[in-house]
Amino acid sequence: MMLPLGLQQEAVQRQYDEVIAPHYDLDSKGVLGQSMERAIEQICRCRLSDNGRPFKVLDLGMGTGKFLEMLQGHQGGLQAFGIDLSARMIDIARGRIPGLVAAVDDVAHLDAHFGVESFDLICTHFITGFVPMSLLAPTIHRRLTEGGSWSLVGGTKAGFPTLRKKAGEPPLKWLFGGRPLGVDELVCNPADREEVVRVLESHGFAVRECETFTPRLAFKNLKEFMDFAYFGGWLTPFVEALGLHQARAVTRALLDTFFFPVEDHHCIEIVLAQKKKG
């Protein structure tokens, strides 16, 4: 996994095992579930499995297996495969998906798993903040069947504009010792839809459907924000880099008084692309 500056694989693995896994399926604010539903709608509209044979799906960064479970309800004959860095999340996934073939590993090591198996659909949902699309694309293209598809769901740098602005203001910097608070130092999301489409097309994919999802978010106080951003996994590296998860009672009270409430929105690209034939 090619992690952004200052973000080590061990740190990400610990965050998912210890912080995120127990809370992931709670899906504070419902953004994860809504994003997955939109991705499944794209897959169903394009009738990917209408070929009379088992439909092999690989979910890279599969988390607790929620997407595969949801997809099974719409696609008959699905054979589920997955990789995730978090052993705890994989354990949850194995409990909910009978017959799941899964590996605990970095998605960059995909070629070390599943033998010579190729897949009708490969999913990458919210991992392009950790692994650049340009690194994922060649491997995914190679492991897809002829005419197979890539379901990509991921945030862009246009997300959380209000939080980004507030994080750079003097009062918050003062509270945390003047430390730089830039999210982009810790994630490698694409800039926008144009970049997503450009990377896909340059690596031999044709975009079949593309939707920009901008869910509105409101946080009454620090607790609501932490439930979503830290325990939900959306901004966990940022919260830890800032030290917000260890903030003392006085700091929390000051944040509730001067920073919250906050209204903002995420910016998520939901794309279904097909490997070009030939």
Image (cartoon, rainbow, N blue to C red):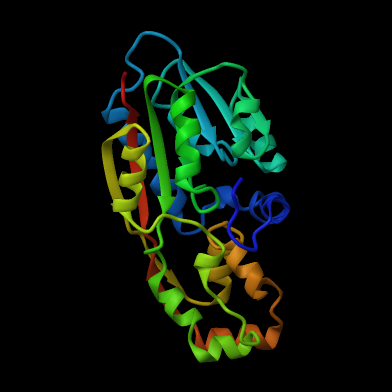
Vertical relation: 172 (above or below) 226: below
Q: Residue furthest top?
A: 52
| Residue 81 horizontal side relative to residue 54, left or right | right
**In which quadrant will I find the N terminus?**
top right
Vertical relation: 66 (above or below) 218: above
Q: Position of residue 57 (x, y in %)?
A: 48, 25
Q: Position of residue 46 (x, y in %)?
A: 27, 27
Q: Quadrant of residue 229?
A: bottom right
Residue 97 visible in this rendered orientation of the protein: yes
Vertical relation: 233 (above or below) 273: below
**In which quadrant will I find the C terminus?**
top left
Q: How many marks?
A: 0
Q: Position of residue 202 (x, y in %)?
A: 34, 39
Q: What residue is at 37 percent from the left and 28 percent from the top?
A: 149
Q: What residue is at 59 percent from the left and 49 percent from the top?
A: 2
| Residue 15 horizontal side relative to residue 194, left or right | right
Q: Position of residue 186 (x, y in %)?
A: 57, 63
Q: Nearer the viewer, residue 26 or 132?
A: 132
Vertical relation: 61 (above or below) 245: above
Residue 260 visible in this rendered orientation of the protein: no
Q: What residue is at 68 percent from the left and 43 percent from the top?
A: 86
Q: What residue is at 52 percent from the left and 53 percent from the top?
A: 27
Q: Quadrant of residue 273?
A: top left
Q: Nearer the viewer, residue 115 or 94?
A: 115
